[in-house]
Image (cartoon, rainbow, N blue to C red):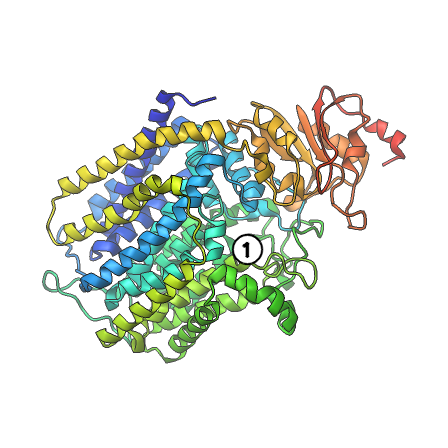
Amino acid sequence: MIPSLGSYIGGCLAVIGILSAVGLGGYWLRRWIVPEFSGALARLADLTIATALLVLALQLLGTLSILTLGWTIVGCIAVGLGAALLGWQMAPRDGREITAPRVQTLALLIALGVASFTVAEWTFPSQLSLDQGMFGGDTTWYHMPFSGRIAQEGSIVHLHFTDPLRLAAWFYPQSSELIHAAGIVLMQSDWLSPLINLGWLAIALLAAWCMGRPYKVGPVTLVAAALVLASGVMIETQPGEGRNDIMGLAFLIAFAAFLINGHQRRAPAAGAVQDVPERDAPLLDGGPLVLAGIAAGLAASVKLTFLVPVGAITVGMILVSGAGRRLMTAAAIGIPAFVVGGYWYVRAAIHTGGNPIPQIGWGPLRLPRPDQMPLDPRPRFAVADYLLEPAVYRKWFFPQLENALGPLFPLILVMAVAAAVYIAFRSRNLILRVLAAAALLTAAVYIVTPLTAAGQEGSPTGFFTNTRYLTPGLVLALVLLPVARPLRAPDSRAWQTLIFLTALYAITVLTTPRWYPGFIVGTVFLTLALVWAPAALGLLRARRRVSRGVVAAVLAAILLLAVVLGRAQEVQYAKHHYTRTTLFLQDGGPQKAYEFAHNQHDKRIGIAGSGEIFFGQYGFYGRDLSNHVQYIGVPGPEGQYRLATTCRQFRRQVNVGDYDYLIVSQYTQDSPDAPYWYPVYAWVKTDPALELLIAEPDIVPQPDYVFEVNDKLDPAGCAELGGG
């Protein structure tokens, strides 16, 4: 069904209204918290606070189970305007912004060129997803199912059990998924979801610029970050998908940028710029620390892997603050970080009875955790398990690192480690030392993290995609590299560093592009909206060449054009998304079952079986996302969700779910020698309450079946199958 023009316009107005309100709130709160910030740094602060306001508003609505169309509009706008009013009342009337050091025009153009190419490269897979749907493994396994369920229920109170795996994904932080859910609620469709990560990419590039801003090397730090953001693993996993690494990276870099820029003081004369102090680096005002805490909370609310760098930086800042200031530093960073980022950890603690991160046992503390079956997407090997096996390096690590980071990956890794080690031990700026030490710790934790080399022993097939877990430490280290004094002073040295990193970037990105000629118009427009227009307007505004009215008019024109172009894209998406069912799983899986579910509306669909069923489960949500899809398992205490182990138990859970349809594979695992291998198809195929609608006996890795449920299943009938 094609959404009506009226619903489209209404959804666009709602999105514009919400973003305008939280943006206004972000602007005025920033004017209160850090009135001295200016230019790009001020815009980064505005965006960070605005995102926090949006997340907090959605969390409040979801907790009250009123995340519906009307309440979402009213609630988010109210939060944004309320924050704006508070900031306007509290902001100093005589605040004086500090102008950043000016950079060379050529350096600025190089940075804009790199940012443009990076954004352009991301737009192609994003537009492809706008045409055919999102098919990334994690996207269809749990990211978008979380968003879809939140949008259906209007609530984030209850856990959504997506599978029986040991990972217990339902306890992951879900701020990114919550924003996708809001998009679904407002537009009555998920067609905006493939574009959301482009916004986080733009913020990440802006934050990278701001890390080098006080040292006059903003263009260089942006190019250094782009080496990671345009790398193969990022292009393969983030654009046009529901994966959330880029959102965490954006606010991790912003966290570091606010700390580095926190030394800007209210200058005695307009436009004066003070040098960044070296030895007394930790002596920050409360405002920059509060802003850093907000960014830290956003990063931690996205993905568990960001807890390591966020926690290390926070602890480091407290330790180096000096006697008499540690408590203030801890409160200034910790309180806003907890307010913005603590929701999902408190929710997990409530559901488990005290464990904020149930995936961790916490050793002697013996905190409660779900007793999951030892089932994993792949055998859970870590990189550390292969440190002394050169054959694995030659066959897997080196080729996949080339795919992930480009042909010069050894140079990139060596530069990152060398920069982090040098700054951690030699820099006189204690903030830079803390950031470098956090980057090294993040890399060390990556090496021992389970699943970083997932796969059968000796064949770490999951290594490539899980190099994403290294990116937080890698991007921190690379962005710190141009800030190291030997590479930025004198100015000629900074210029040489820029040329070198730009050449390295050019060589790297030549190995990763996925260009589609039919998307050129969209690419030009998206690059205009995310890079050219903000940069040009910001520069002209800083130099007093244009008025605020002109800026507003240009932005309004871009927004109007986006609304006009968006309607055609929404219609295209409604007609064609998820119609190519072969894209759901790389190694086979259901085809007719997806086609069947895609055309259902407001049905309860129970799914069971192996990974071919639950890894692509978002495809069962239907064309309008109205189907209630649930993996059939056995809930238990402390957020536990396990496979049914007997026929009787399975049939009882089917009855509890009150499903309209069942979609199952033949067994719960692909090999009869695997543990927890149960014949779910055999358990239900003879029950008279079920009618077989679709059978795909020749599908690999297993046959799959679709049943209509006409009545309650009979657990006693399992006796005919030999008990169970």
Q: Residue at x 80, y 25 (%)?
A: 687
Q: Position of residue 14 (x, y in %)?
A: 34, 30
Quadrant position of residue 240 = top left
Residue ranking furthest to the bottom: 426
Q: Position of residue 458 (x, y in %)?
A: 68, 64
Q: Position of residue 593 (x, y in %)?
A: 65, 30
Q: Is residue 601 left or right of residue 492?
A: right
Is the C terminus in the top left, top right, bottom left or bottom right quadrant? top right
Q: Position of residue 196 (x, y in %)?
A: 40, 42
Q: Is residue 559 left or right of residue 176?
A: left
Residue bearing mark 1:
465
110 and 614: which is toward the camera: 110
Q: Residue at x 17, y 57 (%)?
A: 97
* Residue 225, visible in the rendered structure: yes
159 and 190: which is toward the camera: 190
586 and 709: which is toward the camera: 586
